[in-house]
Image (cartoon, rainbow, N blue to C red):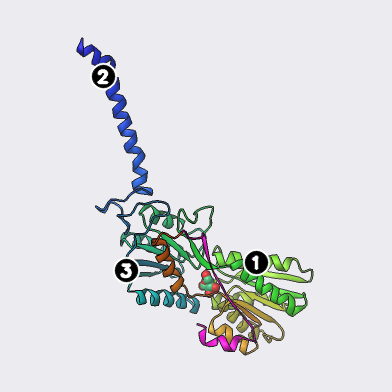
């Protein structure tokens, strides 16, 4: 009788309990790997193992942090100034910096971030090469309970979201930078120009948005025409070569708009080699605020340079402190930029890079 009661009621109840226990355990699995509490035994590869791992992962307050900084390249003065600013601020605070330079390669930058995760840094400052290449690495860091703060370049928000996959983006308003160049040109040329545009690295957020801000503004001007717009990879030498080629099909160019100073300096060399006088025959404009850009304005070879500040050290580490202290951060911390012309280039030369 007892046995038949167990068979009729007890056994199904036992199976139901077992199933419920298994389901509960399954429900916790993603939480511990992808956003739940990380165990202090080190099952998480992150450096934030004792905090509760939400999305984005929290950062435990410390006197000193182990900070990863993944730089996408070190091939121009802007990148070097950015790295120097981060290193100097880390040094001032006595924080440990784990630095990696991806040498202009998306796949190297992904493995650089993976290494930082393996080294259990507390937080990662990431300057992603393009809007899409670093998405898997951002998600991997989040899974390891390590918060990521994007600096200088943004990512595609349909693929990774601020205040979820990563903490926030600290950077300039690139659309506004392009618009400022266009507005200056409209005044200088009385709304009449034939333009060659040298774009930054394809897929990089400053290239996408500096183009958008500029092109949208130029579209509203009946007598301003973009003759050609081509990738110059944010590089001086590529900018020079692209300009050299484009000059052959567009010798009537009157304006060059380069997405950074490096490409503008390259374009100036190409213009001179083609027998044109930059600043007289062709107005050259760009973005960044390098010493070479400001000197080109002083020499009368560039018209205007809209600044894109590379000095991310103070704001990045202040943001780390605020985040660890529980401050609710905006999705985008906007870096404010100046604009340089012949009226202020000389006085800003000492602070350029
Ligand atoms: O992301 C900022 C841009 O990248 C700078 O304008 C450029 O010089 C750099 O390589």
204 or 188: nearer the eye? 188
Reading the image, the residue beneath label 1 is 213
Measured as percent of width and height from the top left, residue 257 is found at 65, 75
Measured as percent of width and height from the top left, residue 269 is found at 60, 84
Q: Earlier in the sequence, mark 3 or mark 1?
A: 3
What span is colored magenta in the figure? 328-353
Reading the image, the residue beneath label 2 is 10
Task: Look at the picture and state if 300 lies above or below 223.
Answer: below
- Residue 234 visible in this rendered orientation of the protein: no
Instruction: Say what secondary structure mark 1 lies in.
Output: helix
Label 3 crowd bin: few (<14), some (14–19), many (20+), radius 10 Å: few
User: Residue at the spot x=52%, y=83% of the render?
Assistant: 352
- Check if mark 3's residue and mark 1's residue have beta carbons within 8 Å: no
Task: Tell me the number on the disc at residue 64.
Answer: 3
- Residue 60 occupies which quadrant of the picture? bottom left
Measured as percent of width and height from the top left, residue 149 is found at 44, 62
Q: Is mark 2 within 8 Å of ligand 1?
A: no
- Residue 298 occupies which quadrant of the picture? bottom right
Q: CA distance from mark 3 to mark 1?
A: 40 Å
Measured as percent of width and height from the top left, residue 162 is found at 49, 56
- Looking at this view, name the residue that lies furthest to the right: 222
Task: Look at the picture and state if 316 lies above or below 136.
Answer: below
Q: Nearer the viewer, mark 2 or mark 1?
A: 2
Image quarter in which the N terminus is found: top left
Task: Look at the picture and state if 48 lies above or below 268.
Answer: above
Q: Earlier in the sequence, mark 3 or mark 2?
A: 2
User: Residue at the spot x=53%, y=55% of the render?
Assistant: 157
63 or 112: nearer the eye? 63
- Residue 17 occupies which quadrant of the picture? top left
């Amino acid at each position: 009788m007892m046995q038949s009661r167990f068979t009729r009621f007890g056994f199904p109840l036992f199976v139901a309990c077992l199933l419920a226990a298994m389901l509960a355990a399954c429900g916790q699995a993603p939480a511990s790997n992808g956003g739940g509490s990380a165990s202090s035994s080190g099952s998480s590869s992150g450096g934030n193992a004792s905090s509760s791992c939400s999305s984005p992962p929290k950062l435990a307050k410390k006197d000193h942090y182990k900070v990863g900084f993944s730089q996408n390249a070190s091939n121009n003065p802007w990148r070097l100034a950015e790295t120097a600013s981060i290193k100097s601020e880390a040094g001032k605070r006595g924080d440990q910096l784990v630095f990696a330079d991806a040498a202009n390669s998306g796949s190297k930058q992904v493995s650089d971030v993976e290494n930082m995760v393996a080294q259990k840094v507390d937080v990662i400052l990431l300057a992603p090469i393009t809007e899409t290449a670093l998405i898997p690495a951002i998600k991997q860091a989040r899974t390891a309970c390590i918060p990521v703060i994007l600096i200088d370049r943004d990512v595609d928000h349909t693929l990774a979201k601020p205040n979820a996959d990563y903490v926030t983006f600290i950077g300039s308003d690139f659309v506004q930078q392009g618009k400022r160049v266009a507005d200056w040109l409209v005044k200088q040329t009385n709304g009449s120009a034939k333009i060659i545009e040298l774009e930054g690295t394809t897929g990089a957020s400053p290239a996408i948005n500096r183009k958008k801000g500029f092109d949208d503004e130029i579209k509203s001007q009946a007598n301003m025409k973009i003759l050609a717009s081509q990738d110059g990879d944010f590089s001086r030498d590529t900018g020079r070569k692209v300009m050299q080629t484009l000059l052959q099909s567009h010798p009537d160019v009157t304006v060059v708009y380069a997405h950074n100073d490096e490409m503008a300096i390259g374009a100036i060399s190409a213009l001179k080699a083609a027998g044109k006088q930059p600043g007289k025959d062709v107005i050259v404009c760009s973005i960044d605020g390098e010493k070479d850009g400001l000197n080109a304005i002083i020499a009368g070879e560039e018209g205007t340079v809209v600044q894109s500040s590379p000095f991310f050290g103070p704001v990045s580490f202040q943001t780390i402190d605020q985040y660890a202290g529980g401050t609710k951060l905006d999705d985008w911390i906007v870096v404010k930029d100046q604009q340089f012309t012949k009226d202020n280039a000389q006085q800003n030369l000492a602070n350029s890079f």
